[in-house]
Image (spheres, coloured by chain):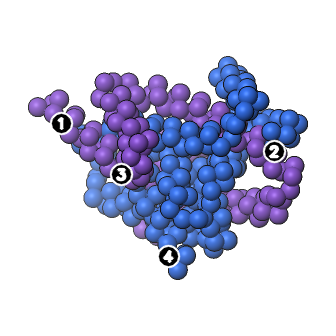
Chain colours: A purple, B blue
Amino acid sequence: MLPLLQDELVKKRRWLEEEELLDLYSIGQCTPGIISINVATFVGYRQAGIKGGIATTLGMILPSLIIITLVAMVLYKYMYNRYVTYAFDGIRIGVVALILDILYGLWKKNVNSYMAAGIFAASLLLLLFFNVSAVFIVIFAGAAGMLLKWRTRV
Amino acid sequence: MIYLILFFEFFKVGLFAIGGGLVTVPFLFDLSEKYSWFTTKELADMIAISESTPGPIGVNMATYAGYHAAGIWGGIIATLGLVTPSVIIIIMIARLMDKYSCNRRVQDVLSGIRPAVVALIFCVGLEIAKLSIVDIKTALMLGVLVLMIHFWKKSPIFYLILSGFAGLIFQL
């Protein structure tokens, strides 16, 4: 996503400097929501206020809305076809393999301290044995991060 | 009524899913348990479709899940619900701050959330694995795919098409 934004926003339209885009991207990463939507809203707002922010966001979701709706409509027709079922049984294994690869990358990047490993282990235990929701985990882990970091600084 | 619930539930996803990529998936898994909108199997299919179409995965997932729950309008409303918190929060931040940056307190909170997201995605992966890895044949296929992905970096679509064909040929 970032290279595309660089091309369009920095080089072609000159709405932003290279550095500003990187700043916006890092804010997009640390605010709630999908990163690219956050960046789009930011850029739109800076160009044309609230309406601009809404316009860029709508622009960002429109391709997904059209493409995914079309794909879903076509798939629904054939979902119960025997061969489509076979293919999707295979594809699901591919999904597991991709998730494992993504997890390996996330693990190396994010579980790199005792604190991170502790929060990872605690979250895993809560999820596996206490059936808590994802919202609960995010609140719990965010609070743990804030308290633990604050304690080590004082 | 279903539209209102869809909007509210996806608003919540947009509010708590922080980051990119598969981060929305654990929240959708929770939704699949709470409502009868889609099953875990269908969630796995959604991941495959979102990975092989253009657009941010989170947005694709919302459109597909919403469509699954309530047709075309369901897809549109779920997606709008997902992005509404972003629009509100980002516009607030842009208004309040002259010099934009993530402050230290926010960084602390994020340093806690990031490892937890790894655990969240792991658990969804586990659920999908339980459904799809059912015998030696499927376990073997997973092993081969994992090694291929690790040593021979290709796009996700390549591996999804490959595993689709494998499913057809071996009739798993």
Q: Are marks 2 and 1 on the same chain?
A: yes
Please tell me which residue is depicted at 69% across the width and 46% down the height of the picture: B48
Nearest to the eye among marks 4 and 3: give it.
3
Q: SS class of the residue under badge 2?
A: helix
Residue type of the residue flagged with mark 2:
Ala
Q: Amino acid at mark 3?
A: Phe
Q: Residue at the location (62% across, 38% down)?
A: B129
**Residue A136, numbered circle:** 3
| Residue marked by disc 4 | B4
Kindly identify the residue that appears in the image at 50 percent across and 40 percent down: B123
Chain ID, mark 1 = A
Q: Nearer the viewer, mark 2 or mark 4?
A: 2
Local crowd size for mark 2, using a 10 Å CA cut-off: few (<14), some (14–19), many (≥20): many
Q: Nearer the viewer, mark 1 or mark 4?
A: 4
What numbered label is drawn on residue A87?
A: 2
Q: Is mark 3 in CB contact (under 8 Å) with mark 2? A: no
Name the N-terminal-most of marks 2 and 1: 2
N-term mark: 3 or 2: 2
Rounded to the nearest angstrom, the CA distance separating label 3 from label 1 is: 21 Å
Q: Are marks 2 and 4 in contact (CB under 8 Å)?
A: no
**CA–CA distance between discs 2 and 1?**
50 Å
Say few, some or many: other residues with alpha carbon within 10 Å of mark 4 (under 14 / 14 to 19 / 20 or more): few
In front of the other: B23 or B55: B23
**Residue A55 visible, this orientation:** no
Chain of the residue under the numbered disc 4 shown in the image = B
Does mark 4 fall on the same chain as mark 2? no
Q: Residue B34, percent across and down?
A: 50, 62
Tag on residue A150?
1
